[in-house]
Amino acid sequence: MILKFTWLHEHNPEIDWTKGEVKMSHCPCCCITCAEEACKEQRAKVWECAAVCACCTGHLPYADLDLLSPPPLAFPHREALYKDV
């Protein structure tokens, strides 16, 4: 993969050469691609947390624990940001 210096300078990625991982932790807020990736990661964390919380509250039949549907968002006014993800 070849990246321009200007792109690297603008996005300033965090690169771990030993693991082969690139994290866009320093990317500016205006970058849509990085914002979408961060949104997906955040949703995955929310779903995982909801599953753990559901398990910790007691035994639930499998039919009651629908992990495919996301839990309600804490900030409903931001729901429009997630509709295309």
Image (cartoon, grey):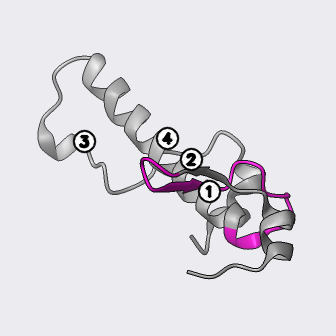
Do the residues under discs 2 and 1 have CB atoms within 8 angstroms?
A: yes
Q: Quadrant of the N terminus?
A: bottom right
- The residue pinned by badge 3 equals 65
- Residue 37 occupies quadrant: bottom right
Give the residue pinned by disc 2.
Answer: 42
Give the residue pinned by disc 1.
Answer: 39
Return the residue at label 4: 46
Residue visible at 38% across and 39% down? 48
Question: Helix, strand, or loop for circle 1?
Answer: helix
Residue 70 percent location from the top left of the image: 45, 52
Query: Mark 2 and mark 4 in contact (Cβ < 8 Å)?
Result: yes
Secondary structure beneath disc 3?
A: loop
Q: Nearer the viewer, mark 3 or mark 4?
A: 4
Q: Nearer the viewer, mark 4 or mark 2?
A: 2
Q: Position of residue 4 (x, y in %)?
A: 77, 80
Dot 1: few (<14), some (14–19), or many (≥20) neighbours within 10 Å? some
Kind of element beneath mark 2: helix
Q: Quadrant of the C terminus?
A: bottom right
The three-letter code of the residue at mark 2 reads: Gln
Give residue 6's mark.
none
Q: Nearer the viewer, residue 38 or 81?
A: 38
Quarter assignment of residue 40 = bottom right
Q: Mark 4 vs mark 1: give the one in front.
A: 1
- Quick one: label 3 or label 2, which is nearer the N terminus? 2
- Looking at the rendered structure, the kind of residue marked 4 is Val
Q: Which residues are magenta?
A: 17-33
